[in-house]
Image: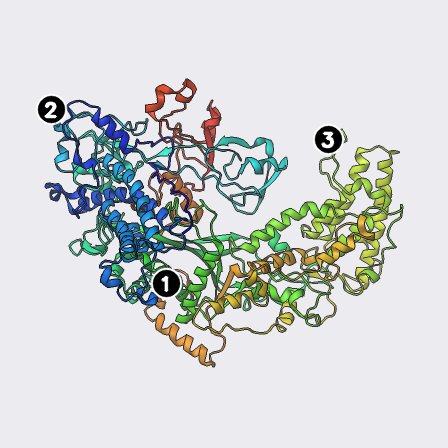
């Protein structure tokens, strides 16, 4: 083997918070202990490797431990086992990804002795073991202690050294990894030994009466004073009596950079950043440097309206917040307990009267037990329930820790959807041969089911039309128009959650937000729906605490497919999915994922959906899978159609794709429209040689139907004839009053206007009627004549150009009257066409026998039905369609060249001084935004799935087979509970909107209350508290309250930054550094109280979505 680099020493982190938890290592503790006189014998608990033969952890060796209730025993045992195994997970990850000696994962999988022909392998190796098996056991907390995990890790390398001779490369690699493990495991063993030593001062002569509880719980207390290892104003040097851990850090407030260069990445800790006063946007220093002085930002209240923000008003802050778990003091024994360990709700429990669980012999506080009782009847407590236990691999039947309270997920109401998904998940686990009774540990509930309304953005309504034939315009004869999308669309939002019982408590493992849309009827024909019933998978999220770990992916696939089956049974026709992985450090539903849980890449997430849809095809739930590009855009793409089949000259605006809140194409349309406003205002032709264009002749310009949209004809007139007039130079751009030093310009001119703005608003579809364009055009010149006196050159140019513009508009309306628009009396004026629609969906028909473009072009498409072959390869091939280059991106293949390159080459010649024009070969100026969205969706066509939930041809054998498979799969679903009037809600299911009503609201609530899911310990607490608030919608703690005035905080919450400081280093630091230590308490202010605060720089703004509903 080549010379290997030295192994990097491994140091397990003490806590996520750097300056809060900085415990000394084991060697330093030993030095402090041996320095104390009359110590006697150092406790054996400090030598973790001496007792490797015992298979009973020290947390359950007490003789009086059995006197406590069973659920309390399991609770304490689980917390201490997880604390003992925490550092081992990170060390195992280092071993499995070791670049020098485990580069190809030699030790990560079981030895395939049959494939390698090792006939004597099982004879030599009596107990095979690999790091992958250790990982499954370790991550499910099935080891009793870190010593047992260390034994299995040693067994992996000792087996390799036993079977392979010393000169073999595998033997040498195993030897190096074993040495690396032993050198780093010593630190872990010492740190776990430290947790068993209390930091409370104990008399040398013996234990006091207040500490007699140590006879019940096995906390090793030596007969001497132990110096404190860590202390801060939060923990005060204490060790939690339940979990034997010290100060533990929490995730600070999530700060995401909204700059173009960072693409939604998390702002690193310790760096400065800028944020908006409303707490919705933040920028790192690099992105802040390139921000314009005026920011046009999306209003978060509705998601689509725009608000103006000035760069100078942004707040400068530093991302250095420290948050630690809150501590409680038992009034009986006086010792400290983590709030999470004690299952205390800080807003619902009286912490001053708190008694720890060991004193009260109850997991929940007594006052919390009374408030969380539920009247819902569930299984009798004598029956028990199956649950996975820490330290064991198979589930056992025990009593639920929160039986009879609202902290039990079984008290949530059920519906036909949740019952069906739960039954299918259990059947799938049994089919995959899970451990006995493991399927009985899972529960599925619909935790939110509420009606919502999607406000369709005006940009979509202006640039897209609904499917269906055109009809005569209402105000002006001779023109036809298509129906515009509705202003709002109602839908049903559901949140489906998967729970699993671990240590007798429910843990939320998986959550899925879905949207269900009914048919959209035509405005002229209510019997003709323009969009069919469809469902949209809005968000998916999970944490890796599911057991057994090998079944996680299959169980999640079953939930998705089972939901699709219920949707098809309720007569939904399509299911939409957008494969969009979260950015690293960001979260979709669960706040703070486990540290070692990998964020899925784009390719990995696509593969996950391919496997899921392949399973759905096998079950007959999904009949076909296609991309959104093929479903909605391909028929309007000139590059995918034959020249004879694509009506490019008279093509209207694009048919609106399915309107789904939060879908990609809507966000892309808003982005393109916002970025194009300035580009259109710059599209002006400069005068050439002091002359203007040829005489405006509409018959020659529009006679061959190059543009049949009236607003595009007006924009062409203004852009190619009015704005190139020699007198139009001062009126093509907005007046820069600051640069020209016109101090009183805005006092005189109340509504500035210019030709560039009018042209851009025409292309952007901002005008509704012709009279609005005429009024704005006259306003350009009347403003100039108002500000400049008579005789001034600008006044004269404005007067001449106004007269010239009126003449050209008269020529245009005469052309309209000639082709049959309006009342053709022969003497029409501009005022007669004031009501002419300027929508981009209005057009001048070629003939009276006008046909719908969507129906004519769709007939040219060839059906390419998916033929399922048993794997996801057919789905991948169907998603790319004819764009085979998408499959070969990694190999350097590029998409086919488009006409943009040719236009750029032409621009280098005679047209160098001309403006940027649309693609001359397409002539679809009215559909420029739809074409731009089309190109983007085509490049990303593999990310957007459209699944058919119906059969089109029942005569084919494949269709009959799929229908039979679906009928067998859906047989247990009760469709009678969903009537035809409301097929989206179970008639038995009744729930009120709560914390899970919206995905961003649930995530915001979790951040506010520090409900994290990074460990099983915190996931159990977070799930319990969320279950409580789901069933107590009006309880305190959902809506933030101001610390000073105690009023509800609305819109913006000003959170005080906590910066912890280790008291041990206080004497060695300067006064300025020592004063940075603040009290680790929650301080939230409303905007009026924040305005009165003197130290405003120590607060950060956080958005607040929840509001109290007045009855």
Residue 1025 visible to the viewer: no
Circle on res. 205: 2
Looking at the picture, does residue 762 appear above or below residue 320? Answer: below
Left or right placement of residue 197 versus residue 1010 in this view? left
- Would you say 3 lies left or right of 362 here? right
Crowd class of label 2 (few under 14; some 14 to 19; many from 20; radius 10 Å): few
Residue 101 x/y as whole percent: 38, 50
What residue is shown at x 55% (from left), y 68% (from top)? Answer: 528
The residues tagged by marks 2 and 1 sit, at their Cα atoms, a distance apart of 62 Å
- Residue 450 position in % (x across, y down): 41, 53
Label 2: state its secondary structure: loop
| Label 3 vs label 2, nearer the camera | 2
CA distance separating discs 3 and 1: 64 Å
- Examine the rendering and report whether any part of residue 299 can be seen: yes
Q: Which residue is pictured at 49% across the width and 67% down the height?
A: 875
Quarter of the image for residue 425 reads bottom left
Assign a secondary structure to mark 1: helix
- The label on residue 738 is 3
From the viewer's perspective, is residue 921 above or below residue 233?
A: below
Residue at label 1? Answer: 558
Question: Where residue 1068 is drawn, which disc sits there?
Answer: none
Compare residues 621 and 18 and report the one nearer the observer: 18
N-terminal of the pair, mark 3 or mark 1, is 1
Q: Residues within 10 Å of mark 1 (few under 14, many from 20)?
A: many
**Residue in the picture at 60% in, 56% down:** 936
The mark nearer the N terminus, 3 or 2, is 2
In this rendering, the label closer to the viewer, 3 or 1: 1
């Amino acid at each position: 083997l080549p010379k290997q680099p030295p192994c990097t020493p491994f140091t397990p982190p003490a806590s996520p918070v750097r300056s809060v938890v900085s415990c000394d290592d084991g060697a330093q503790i030993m030095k402090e202990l041996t320095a104390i006189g009359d110590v006697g014998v150092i406790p054996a608990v400090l030598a973790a490797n001496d007792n490797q033969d015992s298979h009973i952890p020290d947390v359950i060796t007490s003789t009086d431990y059995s006197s406590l209730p069973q659920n309390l025993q399991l609770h304490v045992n689980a917390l201490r086992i997880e604390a003992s195994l925490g550092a081992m997970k990170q060390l195992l990850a280092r071993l499995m990804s070791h670049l020098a000696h485990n580069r190809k994962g030699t030790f990560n999988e079981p030895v395939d002795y049959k494939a390698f022909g090792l006939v004597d392998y099982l004879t030599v190796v009596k107990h095979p073991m690999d790091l992958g098996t250790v990982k499954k056991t370790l991550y499910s907390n099935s080891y009793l202690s870190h010593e047992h995990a260390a034994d299995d890790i040693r067994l992996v390398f000792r087996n390799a050294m036993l079977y392979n001779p010393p000169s073999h490369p595998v033997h040498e690699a195993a030897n190096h990894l074993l040495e690396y493990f032993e050198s780093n495991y010593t630190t872990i063993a010492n740190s776990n030994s430290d947790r068993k030593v209390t930091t409370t001062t104990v008399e040398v002569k013996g234990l006091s009466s207040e500490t007699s509880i140590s006879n019940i719980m096995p906390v090793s207390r030596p007969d001497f004073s132990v110096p404190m290892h860590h202390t801060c104003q939060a923990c005060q040097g204490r060790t939690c009596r339940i979990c034997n851990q010290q100060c533990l850090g929490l995730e600070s407030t999530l700060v995401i950079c909204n700059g173009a260069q960072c693409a939604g990445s998390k702002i690193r800790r310790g760096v400065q950043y800028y944020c908006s006063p409303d707490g919705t946007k933040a920028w790192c220093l690099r992105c802040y440097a390139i921000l314009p002085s005026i920011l046009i930002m999306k209003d978060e209240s509705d998601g689509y309206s725009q608000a103006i923000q000035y760069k100078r008003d942004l707040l400068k802050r530093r991302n250095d917040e420290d948050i630690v778990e809150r501590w409680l003091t038992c009034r009986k024994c006086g010792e400290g307990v983590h709030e999470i360990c004690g299952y205390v709700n800080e807003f619902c429990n009286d912490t001053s009267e708190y008694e720890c669980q060991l004193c009260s012999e109850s997991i929940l506080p007594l006052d919390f037990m009374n408030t969380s009782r539920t009247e819902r009847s569930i299984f009798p407590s004598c029956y028990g329930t199956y649950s996975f236990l820490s330290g064991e691999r198979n589930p056992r039947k025990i009593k639920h820790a929160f039986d009879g309270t609202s902290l039990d997920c079984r008290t949530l109401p059920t519906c036909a959807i949740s019952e069906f998904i739960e039954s299918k998940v259990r059947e799938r686990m049994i089919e995959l041969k899970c451990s006995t009774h493991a399927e009985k540990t899972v529960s599925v509930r619909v935790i939110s089911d509420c009606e919502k309304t999607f406000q369709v953005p005006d940009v979509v309504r202006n640039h897209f039309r609904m499917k269906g034939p055109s009809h005569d315009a209402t105000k002006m004869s001779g023109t036809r128009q298509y129906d515009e999308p509705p202003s709002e669309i109602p839908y049903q939002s559901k949140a489906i959650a998967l729970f699993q019982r671990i240590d007798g408590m429910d843990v939320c493992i998986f959550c899925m937000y879905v949207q269900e849309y009914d048919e959209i009827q035509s405005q002229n024909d209510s019997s003709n729906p323009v969009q069919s019933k469809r469902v949209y998978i809005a968000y998916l999220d999970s944490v890796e605490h599911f057991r057994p770990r090998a079944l996680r992916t299959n169980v999640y696939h079953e939930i998705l497919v089972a939901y699709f089956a219920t949707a098809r049974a309720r007569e939904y026709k399509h299911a939409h999915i957008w494969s969009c992985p979260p950015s690293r450090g960001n979260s979709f539903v669960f706040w703070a994922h486990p540290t070692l849980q990998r964020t899925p890449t784009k390719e990995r997430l696509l593969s996950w959906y391919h496997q899921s849809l392949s399973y759905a095809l096998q079950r007959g739930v999904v009949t076909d899978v296609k991309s959104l590009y093929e479903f909605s855009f391909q028929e309007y793409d000139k590059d995918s159609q034959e020249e004879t089949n694509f009506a490019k000259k008279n093509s209207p605006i694009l048919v609106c794709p399915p309107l789904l809140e939060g879908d990609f194409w809507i966000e892309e349309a808003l982005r393109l429209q916002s970025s194009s406003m300035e580009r259109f205002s710059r599209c002006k032709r400069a005068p050439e040689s002091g002359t203007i264009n040829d005489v405006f002749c509409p018959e020659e310009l529009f006679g061959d139907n190059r543009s049949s949209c009236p607003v595009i004809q007006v924009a062409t007139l203004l852009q190619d004839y009015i704005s190139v007039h020699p007198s139009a130079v001062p009126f093509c751009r907005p007046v820069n009053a600051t640069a020209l030093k016109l101090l009183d310009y805005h006092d005189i001119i109340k509504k500035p206007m210019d030709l560039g703005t009018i042209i851009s608003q025409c292309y952007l579809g901002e005008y509704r009627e012709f009279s609005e364009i005429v009024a704005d055009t006259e306003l350009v010149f009347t403003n100039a004549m108002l500000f400049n006196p008579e005789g001034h050159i600008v006044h004269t140019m404005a007067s001449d150009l106004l007269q010239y513009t009126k003449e050209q508009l008269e020529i245009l309306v005469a052309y309209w009257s000639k082709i049959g628009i309006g009342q053709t009396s022969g003497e029409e004026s501009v005022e007669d066409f004031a009501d002419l629609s300027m929508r981009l969906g209005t057009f001048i028909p070629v003939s009276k026998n006008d046909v719908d473009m969507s129906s004519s072009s769709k007939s040219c498409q060839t059906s390419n039905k998916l033929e399922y072959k048993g794997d996801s390869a057919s789905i991948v091939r169907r998603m790319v369609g004819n764009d085979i280059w998408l499959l070969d991106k990694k190999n350097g293949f590029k998409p086919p060249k488009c006409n943009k390159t040719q236009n750029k080459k032409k621009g280098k010649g005679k047209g160098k001084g001309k403006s940027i024009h649309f693609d001359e070969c397409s002539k679809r100026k009215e559909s420029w935004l739809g074409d731009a969205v089309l190109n983007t969706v085509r490049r990303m066509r593999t990310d957007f799935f459209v699944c058919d939930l119906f059969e089109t041809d029942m005569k084919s054998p494949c269709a009959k087979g799929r229908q039979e498979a679906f009928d067998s799969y859906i047989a247990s679903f009760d469709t009678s509970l969903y009537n035809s009037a409301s097929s989206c809600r179970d008639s038995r299911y009744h729930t009120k909107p709560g914390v899970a009503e919206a995905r961003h609201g649930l995530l915001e609530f979790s951040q506010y209350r520090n409900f994290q899911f990074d460990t099983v310990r915190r996931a159990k607490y977070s799930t319990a508290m969320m279950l409580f608030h789901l069933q107590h919608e009006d309880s305190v703690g959902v809506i933030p309250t101001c610390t000073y005035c105690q009023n509800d905080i609305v819109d913006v919450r000003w959170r005080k930054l906590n910066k912890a400081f280790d008291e041990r280093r206080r004497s060695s630091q300067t006064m300025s550094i020592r004063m940075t230590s603040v009290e680790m308490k929650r301080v939230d202010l409303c905007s009026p109280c924040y305005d009165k605060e003197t130290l405003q720089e120590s607060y950060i703004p956080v958005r607040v979505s929840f509001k109290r509903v007045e009855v």
